[in-house]
Image (cartoon, grey):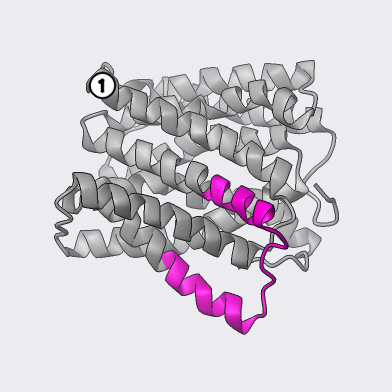
């Protein structure tokens, strides 16, 4: 895991690419794992195992705990938003019949929503070129996902769960930048995953049967989501939020649907249509515009 000592410039350059690659595998992991466990049960087990793995790291490395109850509460709020409500909403929506394409399309709107909230929450300015980038990125995501749309299958409640999850992720990343940018990544992540895990455990106890089919596909998906996503990608995300402008970090999420489509191509034999290729080009152009508008790249030496 990355620590607060600050990795070198090479890691700062690699981090955005590595984050997008890891984060893009999340939908594929959910596709493999959800048939064998209910969503809250799956996530409770995932989050609490991450917390168990983090605790000895926190203790053995002497990781500092938050300096006040208020600081700890801010960290926990982010955990509930980004892990609990976001992933809980997405997993529950898929479980209730919302297609993967519809889910990806809704989640793909997150950067644009984040751009709208950046000013009120952080006071950062989104410039004209960046707005053009967000528009291009949104259009590109729609083109990439369009072949996989299922006509918005699922009831209104399931769609609402997906929308609420997307909004929670947008607010949660900005809340992290505003209130928790200087948190220790080890103890802070432990608190966040513990809080989210307890929330999911409560929901599983109340609403689910908590039956798990321990198949090979489930074990692979579970291990990947714990190690690569929860421990790897989330740590990189907090690093990027600490050292980069919020608009630039948000724009990276535009790349997730195209990269997910590229990964799914060899795994599931899903052909890439011409509009998907055009969409990928628009997404890349949009991200570049947002990056140029922010005026600088991610820097390990820049504070929040």
Is 123 positioned to the left or the right of 24 in the image? right
Q: Which residue is mark 1?
A: 150
Q: Secondary structure at mark 1?
A: loop
Q: Position of residue 204 (x, y in %)?
A: 25, 50
Q: Dominant secondary structure of the magenta stretch?
A: helix
Query: Dot 1: few (<14), some (14–19), or many (≥20) neighbours within 10 Å?
Result: some
Count the labels in the image.
Answer: 1
Q: Position of residue 248 (x, y in %)?
A: 71, 35
Q: Which residue occupies the foreground of this view, 288 or 210?
A: 210
Residue 32 visible in the current orientation = no
Q: Position of residue 200 (x, y in %)?
A: 34, 50
**Residue at the location (52% across, 37% down)?**
169
Q: Position of residue 14 (x, y in %)?
A: 67, 55
**Residue at the location (35% across, 29% down)?**
161
Q: Is residue 125 above or below residue 56?
A: above
The residue segment tinted magenta is: 50-79
**Residue at the location (52% across, 22% down)?**
140
């Amino acid at each position: 895991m990355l620590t607060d000592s600050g990795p070198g410039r090479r890691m700062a350059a690699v981090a955005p690419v590595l984050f997008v690659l890891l984060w893009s595998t999340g939908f594929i992991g959910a596709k493999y794992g959800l048939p064998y466990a209910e969503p809250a049960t799956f996530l409770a087990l995932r989050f609490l195992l991450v917390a168990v793995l983090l605790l000895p790291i926190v203790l053995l490395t002497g990781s500092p705990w938050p300096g006040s109850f208020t600081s700890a509460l801010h960290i926990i709020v982010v955990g509930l938003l980004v892990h609990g409500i976001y992933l809980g909403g997405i997993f529950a929506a898929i479980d209730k019949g919302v297609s993967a394409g519809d889910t990806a399309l809704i989640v793909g709107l997150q950067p644009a929503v984040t751009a709208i909230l950046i000013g009120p929450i952080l006071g950062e300015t989104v410039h004209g070129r960046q707005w053009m980038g967000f528009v291009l990125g949104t259009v590109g995501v729609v083109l990439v996902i369009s072949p996989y749309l299922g006509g918005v299958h699922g009831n209104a409640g399931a769609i609402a769960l997906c929308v609420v999850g997307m909004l929670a992720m947008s607010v949660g990343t900005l809340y992290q930048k505003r209130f928790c940018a200087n948190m220790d990544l080890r103890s802070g992540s432990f608190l966040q995953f513990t809080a989210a895990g307890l929330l999911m455990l409560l929901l599983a106890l109340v609403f689910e049967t908590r039956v798990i089919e321990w198949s090979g596909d489930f074990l692979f998906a579970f291990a990947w989501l714990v190690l690569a996503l929860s421990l790897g990608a989330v740590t990189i995300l907090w690093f990027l939020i600490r050292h980069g402008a919020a608009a630039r970090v948000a724009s990276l999420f535009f790349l997730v649907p195209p990269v997910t489509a590229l990964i799914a191509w060899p795994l599931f034999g899903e052909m890439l249509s011409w509009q998907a290729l055009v969409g990928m080009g628009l997404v890349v152009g949009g991200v570049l515009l947002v990056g140029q508008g922010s005026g600088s790249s991610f820097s390990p030496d820049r504070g929040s």
